[in-house]
Image (cartoon, helix red, strand yellow):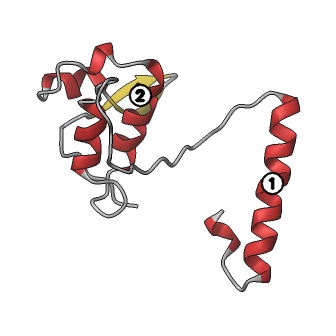
Amino acid sequence: MITLNTFGTRTEIRSGGQTVQIYSLPALEKAGFPGVSRLPYSMKILLENLLRREDAAFVKADDIRAVAQWNATAALEQEISFMPARVLLQDFTGVPCVVDLAAMRDAIVSLGGNPDRI
């Protein structure tokens, strides 16, 4: 998957003897979005996910702008993609979630679709 770096937020850090890529929200602030550090934590998670997945097809620069400039009192009328790499749940909520995902995959297969889409 090719990811873009429209706002120059992708950088590398060394950790545990390895080099890893990160997407820096402070760098996004320096790129002209001064309110990023004051966003609620949940919005920062969405924003980092958009930066990581920007590809101009599913995630566009305008999606990143919309979340970076989010205002709690204004209506956000733009639909954005969210493609989490991990989801942590407690046992009593996680098990039903996994069962639902398995059922959706089975339903896709029975309809002739690709279960990898779930």
Using residue 40 as the reference point, say whether residue 96 is left or right of it. right
Q: Nearer the viewer, residue 79 or 104?
A: 79
Establish if 112 lies above or below 101. below
> To which quarter of the image does residue 95 belong?
top right
Q: Real-space Cα distance between discs 2 and 1?
A: 26 Å
Please count the marks in the image: 2
Q: The C terminus is located in which quarter?
A: bottom right
The residue sitting at 34% across, 23% down in the picture is: 72
Q: Residue 12: image x %, image y %?
A: 33, 31
At x 27% / y 60%, what residue is drawn? Answer: 56
Question: Which residue is disc 2 drawn over?
Answer: 43
Quarter-wise, where is residue 93 in the image? top right
For mark 1, what is the residue? 100
Q: What is the three-letter code of the residue carrying label 2?
A: Met
Q: Give, as a three-letter code, the residue at label 1.
A: Asp
The one of 21 and 53 positioned closer to us in this rendering: 53
